[in-house]
Image (cartoon, rainbow, N blue to C red):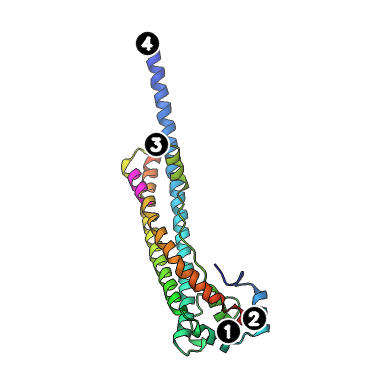
Amino acid sequence: MVVGILIALQINTWNEQRKNRDAEKEYLAAIAEDLRSDIASNENIIKMARNTKTAIENILHVLNNDSTFEELNWNSVRSRCENDTIQFIISLGRTGFMTTPEVYDYTFDDLKSSAKTGLIRDSDIKRALYNYYAVLNRFDSWLEAKRQNHVRMTGLLNALIPLI
Amino acid sequence: MRLWANNNNDENHKDWLTKKPNVEALLTAIRSQEGLKAALEGVKYTHERLIIESDWRITRAEEMLKVLDTALRAKDS
């Protein structure tokens, strides 16, 4: 009788452990998906930021020189229209674009809020994940402070709209 | 924030081609906008930092992904 109860308890423990291992694997796979989304999102930000930077450099070039539009770099602002004046106007509009980093931390947040981080048995991985997500938030306040420049610039450029 | 709702809209291009904005007046206005150069330089710097930050984030995510992929492969075997 006692042996039977002990065996039943042991089987129950094994079942729990197996369930936890399955859940751990599912969570790690979901976090890996979030990380792939982080990578794709940041690749997109780099592309957008490079395009906007080129557009700003075009406007600065015109501000600093008596240049013609032919000297400007349309490569990253080129639209379907080949007219240089319109490309310049598009450059002006392009300067207002800013995509900010988004962190795909949904799975890790879910783990934390449901107090399930214990499912991740490897403490090195757990520490690395905490560190990874904590460090990503430090840039947000810097970016927020720089938003004033952006607001000022778009305000000044918006004043030019009647001329376009 | 955008100056125009849809920069790649053909209809917008048609409008500009028909309207033919006075480029000289536009350039004069741009050059006389006080503070525009400083604001543009500031936003350009923000974008440069964004590029560096995003590049760094990609490296970090790739490193973390490598760790997780290794752990997941070990659990599969």
Dots 4 and 3: beta carbons under 8 Å? no
- Name the residue carrying label 2: B16
Q: Nearer the viewer, mark 4 or mark 2?
A: 2
Which residues fall within the magenta stretch? A125-132
| Quarter of the picture holding the N terminus of chain A | top left
Figure quadrant of residue A158: bottom right
Q: Residue A137: which numbered mark, if any?
A: none
Structural distance between the alpha carbons of marks 1 and 3? 60 Å
Structural distance between the alpha carbons of marks 1 and 4? 90 Å
> Is the stretch drawn in magenta largely helix, strand or loop?
helix
Which residue is most to the front?
B34
Q: Earlier in the sequence, mark 4 or mark 3?
A: 4
Which residue is most to the top?
A1
The answer to whether residue A94 is magenta is no
User: Secondary structure under badge 3?
Assistant: helix
Q: Residue A2: which numbered mark, if any?
A: 4
- Name the residue carrying label 1: A85
**Residue A2 in the figure: left or right of residue B26:** left
Structural distance between the alpha carbons of marks 1 and 2? 9 Å
Foreground residue, A77 or A16? A77
Dots 1 and 2: beta carbons under 8 Å? yes
Q: Position of residue B13 (x, y in %)?
A: 64, 78
Q: Residue A119: which numbered mark, if any?
A: 3
**Residue type (three-letter) at the residue carrying disc 2:** Trp
| Quarter of the picture holding the C terminus of chain A | bottom right
- The chain identifier of the residue carrying mark 2 reads B
Badge 1 local density, few (<14 within 10 Å), some, or many (20+)? Answer: some
